[in-house]
Image (cartoon, helix red, strand yellow):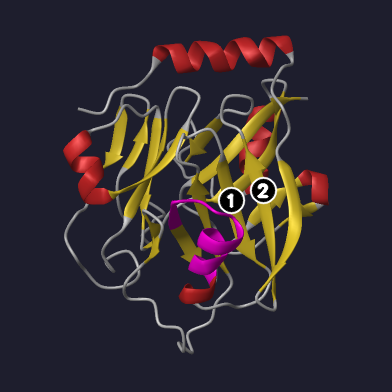
């Protein structure tokens, strides 16, 4: 059973009150002839949260709407990114957990589109850590998560690229995703600034960023909110959003 961590929430609120939440570190990176923006976050210093629905039941949809809600509480988004695939009504395609609320169950069967290109995976945000976990392993181990979002395909699985990625693929999109360190103490988010293939994007996480597991969030609609870079991408309304919250 997936359980919410009260200790995680208490720690996050305490750090906000003390002004101890660190800002993410975002920078541009050149890899294999393409430009990427990479944001590194230590979940112990900068707790991550998921955002989907507002109090009125409507999806947030945009970084602005999340920031507007947080401003009413004296907080702000210091980093954000779209965080998983969604249906037309912006409901999540796969597992989406927010505390005790499960908006969608874990999906482990193959299917159409990138999400169904198994293996896919889950980003699990726990007590001071973040982990990308392949979906069948997630089902077996049932880790403790405060927030969780499922997407696919996996980009890197235990140090190996997804077996379906082709070096000579012609399918190129602006893509975004996340990788996590083996000890769960670093989450590395990346978005391509030009269209890239799955193979190239997976190699970015494996070879340049050195993470053992990485998960694809989406392509084409991929967006980043990084105030330190004076960047907040606009576009189609989003479903799940992941963000780091700091005091104003």
**Residue depicted at 64% across the width and 14% down the height:** 15
Q: Is residue 194 above or below residue 210?
A: below
Q: Where is mark 1, residue-wise? A: 189
Q: Is residue 20 above or below residue 190?
A: above
Residue 92 screen position, x and y as percent:
36, 51
* Label 2 – label 1 distance at C-alpha: 5 Å
**Residue depicted at 58% across the width and 47% down the height:** 188
Residue 35 screen position, x and y as percent:
71, 70
Which structural element holds mark 1? Answer: strand
Q: How many marks?
A: 2
Which is more toward the observer, 212 or 44? 212
- The quadrant in which residue 3 appears is top left
Q: Residues within 10 Å of mark 1 (few under 14, many from 20)?
A: many
| Quadrant assignment for the C terminus | top right
**Residue depicted at 35% across the width and 67% down the height:** 162
Which is more toward the observer, 74 or 32? 32
Which structural element holds mark 2? Answer: strand
The answer to if 203 sits in the magenta stretch is yes
Q: Where is mark 2, residue-wise? A: 39
| 107 sits to left or right of 34 | left
| Quadrant assignment for the N terminus | top left
The answer to if 131 sits in the magenta stretch is no
The stretch of residues the image draws in magenta is: 201-215
| 17 sits to left or right of 219 | right
């Amino acid at each position: 059973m997936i359980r919410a961590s009260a200790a995680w929430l208490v720690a996050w609120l305490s750090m906000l009150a003390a002004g101890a939440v660190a800002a993410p570190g975002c920078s541009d990176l050149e890899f294999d002839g393409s430009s990427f923006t990479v944001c590194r976050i230590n979940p112990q210093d900068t707790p991550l949260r998921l955002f989907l629905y507002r109090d009125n039941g409507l999806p947030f949809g945009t970084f602005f709407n999340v920031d507007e809600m947080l401003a009413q509480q004296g907080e702000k988004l210091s980093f954000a990114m779209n965080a998983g695939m969604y249906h037309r009504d912006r409901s999540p395609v796969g597992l989406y957990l927010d505390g005790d609320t499960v908006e969608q169950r874990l999906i482990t069967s193959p299917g159409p589109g990138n999400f169904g290109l198994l293996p896919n995976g889950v980003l699990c945000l726990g007590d001071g850590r973040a982990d990308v976990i392949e979906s069948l392993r997630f089902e077996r181990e049932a880790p403790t998560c405060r927030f969780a979002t499922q997407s696919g395909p996996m980009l890197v699985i235990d140090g190996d690229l997804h077996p379906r990625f082709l070096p000579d693929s012609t399918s190129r999109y602006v893509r975004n995703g996340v990788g996590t360190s083996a000890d769960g103490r670093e989450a590395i988010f990346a978005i391509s600034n030009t269209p890239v293939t799955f193979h190239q994007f997976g190699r970015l996480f494996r070879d340049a960023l050195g993470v053992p597991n990485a998960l694809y969030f989406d392509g084409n609609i991929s967006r980043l909110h990084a105030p330190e870079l004076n960047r907040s991408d606009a576009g189609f309304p989003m479903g799940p959003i992941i963000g780091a919250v700091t005091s104003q």
